[in-house]
Amino acid sequence: MNTEELKVIANRLRLTAVDMIYKGKDGHPGPALSIADIISVLYFDEMNINPAEPDWEERDRFILSKGHACPIYYAALSEKGYFGKRVEDFGLRALGSTFQGHPVMNKTKGVDMTAGSLGNGISIAGGMALAGKYRKKDYYVYVITGDGELQEGVCWEGINSAAAHRLDNLIVFVDKNGWQSGGTVEDTIGRNNIRERFESFGWHTQEIDGHDIDEIKRAIARAKEAAGSPSAIVCDCVKGKGVPYMENNNAWHKGVPSDEEYIEAGRALGGVK
């Protein structure tokens, strides 16, 4: 798809995510909206997947390690056709719903890893990538993690291991929006110097504008050329991107729009799903 088409899809995914949070009366809009452009490129331009065969062995794998951002993930799976026709009411976070508050791999088609306990995505993705190497498969494993999430020690165990095994079929996107649930990342842990840390572990590392479709596409292409090294793409993102009253406002880490705010979000995002 071309750049403009992917931008339209990204905003449509944002609108669907806001809609499911509004209807479900619970959810995390800020973390979901910040990664919509990355998700748009992966699911509608980059990944080798087949919605009609979600367990296809040759498929690329995707892990949303920051699992609370799942509304944007569910929106992409629906738009891509994993559930047949597009889902209109997801029943987000409802008891027994297919679409839980964090992704569940045995409940929702297209979900490759159950997420929720932060920090596990990179290590599990490393295992998937290593299995692909052993089995001589050509698939890639993609991960989206948060910058706050990287405070978990298990992340760095996985990062170290992936470099040691030269997993050049592993590509990690970091949603570097500067926030976590309790405040800013820098107030919590100090310098948010993610690129330097990944580089020190021997990863091929880039830092880009996480809302620039063309930059995302170029970064993936460069990552795939980095033979012998796993790749980290550090994405400078805006939490709540696309909805002005949510942008860079950590009050929307978790929350439900009022009727008036829901209408305002719809206008900002183009008004159609």
Image (cartoon, rainbow, N blue to C red):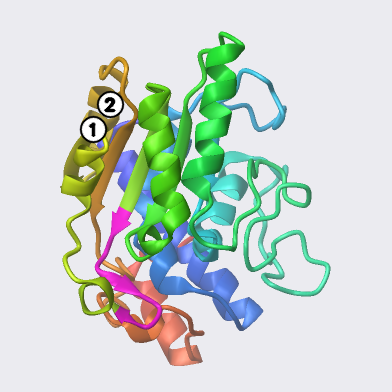
Taking the magenta stretch, the answer to whether it contains residue 178 is: yes
Q: Judging from the image, what secondary structure is the residue with disc 1 in?
A: helix
* Part of the protein shown in magenta: 175-183
- Point out residue 110 in the picture as x, y percentages from the top left corner: 66, 41
Q: Say which residue label 2 marks.
A: 223
The answer to whether residue 6 of the structure is visible from this angle is: yes
The answer to whether residue 160 is above or below residue 98 is above
The residue shown at (26%, 19%) is 226
Label 1 sits on what residue type? Ala
Question: Label 2 is placed on what type of residue?
Answer: Ala
Residue identifier under label 1? 219
Secondary structure at badge 2 equals helix
Q: Residue at x 52, y 15 (%)?
A: 133
Residue 139 x, y percent position in the rendering: 52, 20
How far apart are labels 2 and 1 at the CA level?
Answer: 6 Å
- Left or right position of 199 against 224: left
The foreground one among 94 and 167 is 167
